[in-house]
Image (cartoon, rainbow, N blue to C red):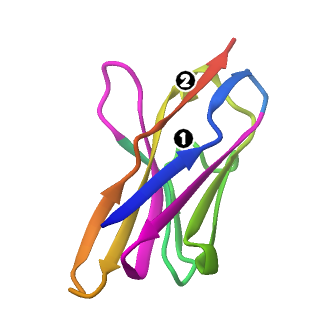
Amino acid sequence: QVQVVESGGGLVQAGGSLRLSCVASGNIFSINAMGWYRQAPGKQRELVADITSGGIINYADSVKDRFIISRDNAKNTVYLQMNSLKPEDTAVYYCKAGVTVTPARVRLNYWGQGTQVTVSS
């Protein structure tokens, strides 16, 4: 079994910063992409940013130049540094990890439980 746990959400004023962390643990052989998604009330879940094990990064247009994704492969951890936050960034942020599990060597996607980010105007 694999667990994915996010931390670091909270309440911040517009223009402020927050740093989210996500760690995957359990029966992990390897992790390919890790990423952050968000879901605002009444909206569909959307990609914020993701990063492969080789460091290839993809950002949503709405967060480019404000958010920075990074990962520590040795710690199975991905981070999201969020700067210049806007009220429209308010959402539940979810972490997703593409994991090849052991011993089956099957690749599956695992999601965390989500962490709330609220940006006040």
The magenta region covers 17-45
Q: Nearer the viewer, mark 1 or mark 2?
A: 2
Residue located beneath label 2 in the image = 88
Q: Going 32% across and 80% down the picture, which residue do you hit?
A: 100
Q: Position of residue 60 (x, y in %)?
A: 49, 49
Quadrant location of residue 119?
A: top right
Residue located beneath label 1 in the image = 62
Let me know if residue 33 is in the magenta part: yes
The amino acid pointed to by label 1 is: Ser
> Total marks drawn?
2
Marks 1/2: CA–CA distance: 10 Å
Task: Using the image, determine if residue 102 lies above or below residue 120.
Answer: below
Most extreme residue toward the right is 16
Q: Position of residue 4 (x, y in %)?
A: 44, 56
Q: Position of residue 39 (x, y in %)?
A: 39, 33
Disc marking residue 100: none
Q: Nearer the viewer, residue 44 or 23?
A: 23
The amino acid pointed to by label 2 is: Glu
Q: Going 54% across and 84% down the picture, which residue do you hit?
A: 54
Quadrant location of residue 11?
A: top right
Task: Using the image, determine if residue 8 lies above or below residue 118.
Answer: below
Secondary element under disc 1, as helix, strand or loop, is loop
Secondary element under disc 2, as helix, strand or loop, is helix
Let me know if residue 79 is in the magenta part: no
1 relative to 54 in the view: left or right = left
Q: Nearer the viewer, residue 119 or 107?
A: 107
In contact (CB < 8 Å): disc 1 and disc 2 = yes
Quadrant location of residue 8?
A: top right
29 relative to 6 in the view: left or right = left
9 relative to 109 in the view: left or right = right
Q: Which numbered disc flags the more N-terminal residue, 1 or 2?
A: 1
